[in-house]
Amino acid sequence: MSDLAGIKQAKSVIGKLGAVFAFYQLNFVKGECDELSGTLCD
């Protein structure tokens, strides 16, 4: 039972990390866009 809970928790943490990574990746692409165009890409 505790193993199953641990797996669920691990998946939750991995999901959150994935979301954070995707968010930073998106911002990094925006940053690249900023440098290429010389304008803010909000």
Image (cartoon, helix red, strand yellow):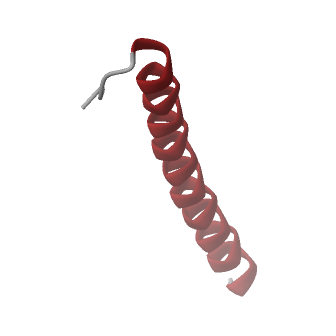
Percent coordinates x, y for residue 23 in the rendering? 45, 44
Q: Residue at x 55, y 37 (%)?
A: 25
Q: In this view, does 25 lie above or below 18?
A: above
Percent coordinates x, y for residue 13 in the rendering? 59, 66
Please state which of residues 6 and 17 is positioned toward the viewer in this rendering: 17
Please state which of residues 38 and 9 is positioned toward the viewer in this rendering: 38
Q: How many marks?
A: 0
- Work out which residue is located at the far bottom of the displayed protein and give it: 2
Percent coordinates x, y for residue 36 in the rendering? 49, 14
- Work out which residue is located at the far left of the displayed protein and give it: 42
Q: In this view, does 29 lie above or below 1?
A: above
- Work out which residue is located at the far front of the displayed protein and give it: 38
Q: In this view, does 37 lie above or below 31?
A: above
Q: Residue at x 68, y 83 (%)?
A: 1
Q: Is residue 17 left or right of residue 26?
A: right
Q: In this view, does 25 lie above or below 17?
A: above
Percent coordinates x, y for residue 4 in the rendering? 68, 73
Residue 42, image quadrant: top left
- Work out which residue is located at the far top of the displayed protein and give it: 37
Q: Which residue is drawn at 62% across and 78% down?
A: 5
Please state which of residues 9 and 14 is positioned toward the viewer in this rendering: 14
Q: Is residue 23 left or right of residue 2?
A: left
Please state which of residues 41 and 17 is positioned toward the viewer in this rendering: 41
